[in-house]
Image: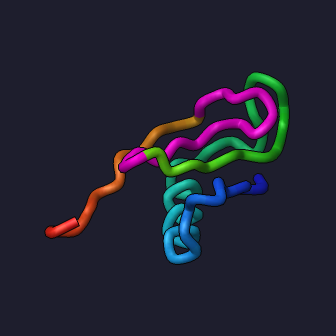
Amino acid sequence: MKIIFDPEVTEELKEEIRSLVEEAEIDKKCPECGAQEIYVALLGRILDVKCYECGHSFLEIEMETEEGE
């Protein structure tokens, strides 16, 4: 599956996010429309993973922050 990142997702987070998406074992295609691209956006502390075509939500992950952030 191809991952498309929101422009607000920093380069340093992309590799970590790729690992999280792989660990979540998301299917190779969307169960709703069959698309093979997902869109990842960071909304505050929530990582939102959706189908790029239809918006079907695969998962949301709350990101931890380090002390002082």
Q: Quadrant of residue 21?
A: bottom right
In the rendered image, residue 29 lying in the magenta stretch gets the answer: no
> Magenta part of the protein: which range?
44-57
Quarter of the C terminus within the rendering: bottom left
Q: Nearer the viewer, residue 15 or 67?
A: 67
Task: Give the color scheme: rainbow, by chain, secondary structure or one colour.
Answer: rainbow
Q: Percent from the top left, x then y, of residue 14?
A: 57, 68
Using residue 35 as the reference point, say whether residue 30 is left or right of it. Answer: left
Identify whether 16 is placed above or below 45. below
Using residue 16 as the reference point, say whether residue 63 is left or right of it. Answer: left
Q: Percent from the top left, x then y, of residue 57?
A: 59, 30
Residue depicted at x 76% and y 53%: 1
Residue depicted at x 16% and y 69%: 68
Q: Nearer the viewer, residue 28 or 13?
A: 13
Using residue 32 as the reference point, say whether residue 43 is left or right of it. Answer: left
Q: Quadrant of residue 6?
A: bottom right
